[in-house]
Image (cartoon, rainbow, N blue to C red):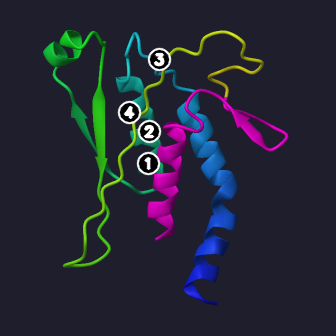
């Protein structure tokens, strides 16, 4: 099997797991305003820990958060070494979203899959990015 075929097989094998991971992220509301994003960071860190990753938690000081008109922010940093002397790659995503507004036909925090489509806040941007980055790191 070529490296590409191995990677393709890994992605196929773990696809449903990635969808479940994304569903878990979507189920933690992160509307901004009000900007209470620490619970999302906590849940993300828990999910990453279950995969064997240690996410460093960096809480933004309350005074800075309040000055920005928000309630809580915790940044996560996940590091994975692939070898000595190699390049560093930084992947960046956010978990907050604007409030859902009206017109939803599915729970905006449900992460429901219907006819092969997932519905929920940030499934495309940026909780979807967090899921994609996480599984890309695992696949490598």
The first of marks 3 and 4 along the sequence is 3
- C-alpha separation, residue under disc 4 versus residue under disc 1: 10 Å
Q: Quadrant of residue 73?
A: top left
Q: Secondary structure at mark 2?
A: helix
Q: Nearer the viewer, residue 33 or 46?
A: 33
Residue at the spot of label 2: 44
Image disc number at residue 15: none
From the viewer's perspective, is 18 left or right of 46? right
Please give the name of the residue rendered at 29% of the width and 30% of the height, measured from the top-left corner.
74
Residue 28 on image: x %, y %? 52, 25
Q: Residues within 10 Å of mark 2 (few under 14, many from 20)?
A: many
Residue at the spot of label 4: 41
Residue at the spot of label 3: 31
Please give the name of the residue rendered at 58% of the width and 44% of the height, measured from the top-left corner.
21
> Does residue 13 sit above or below 107 in this rendering?
below
Tag nearer the camera, 3 or 2 = 3
Residue at the spot of label 1: 48
- C-alpha separation, residue under disc 1 versus residue under disc 3: 22 Å
Tag nearer the camera, 1 or 3 = 3
From the viewer's perspective, is 12 left or right of 21? right
Q: Residues within 10 Å of mark 4 (few under 14, many from 20)?
A: many
The first of marks 4 and 1 along the sequence is 4
> Does residue 21 sit above or below 26 in this rendering?
below
Tag nearer the camera, 3 or 4 = 3
Residue 107 on image: x %, y %? 70, 19
- C-alpha separation, residue under disc 3 versus residue under disc 2: 16 Å
Q: Quadrant of residue 83?
A: bottom left
- C-alpha separation, residue under disc 3 versus residue under disc 4: 13 Å
Magenta range is 111-140
Is the Cβ of the residue at disc 4 closer than 8 Å to that at disc 1? no
């Amino acid at each position: 099997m070529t490296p590409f075929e191995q990677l393709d097989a890994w992605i196929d094998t773990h696809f449903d797991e990635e969808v479940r991971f994304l569903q878990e992220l979507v189920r933690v509301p992160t509307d901004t305003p009000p900007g209470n994003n620490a619970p999302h960071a906590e849940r993300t860190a828990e999910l990453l820990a279950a995969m064997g990753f240690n996410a460093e938690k960096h809480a933004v000081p309350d005074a800075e958060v309040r000055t920005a008109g928000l309630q809580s922010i915790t940044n996560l940093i996940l590091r994975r070494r692939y070898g000595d002397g190699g390049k560093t790659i930084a992947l960046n995503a956010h978990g907050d979203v604007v409030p859902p507004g009206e017109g939803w036909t599915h729970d905006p925090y449900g992460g429901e899959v219907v006819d092969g489509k997932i519905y929920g806040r940030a499934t495309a941007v940026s909780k979807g990015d967090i899921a994609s980055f996480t599984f890309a790191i695992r696949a490598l």
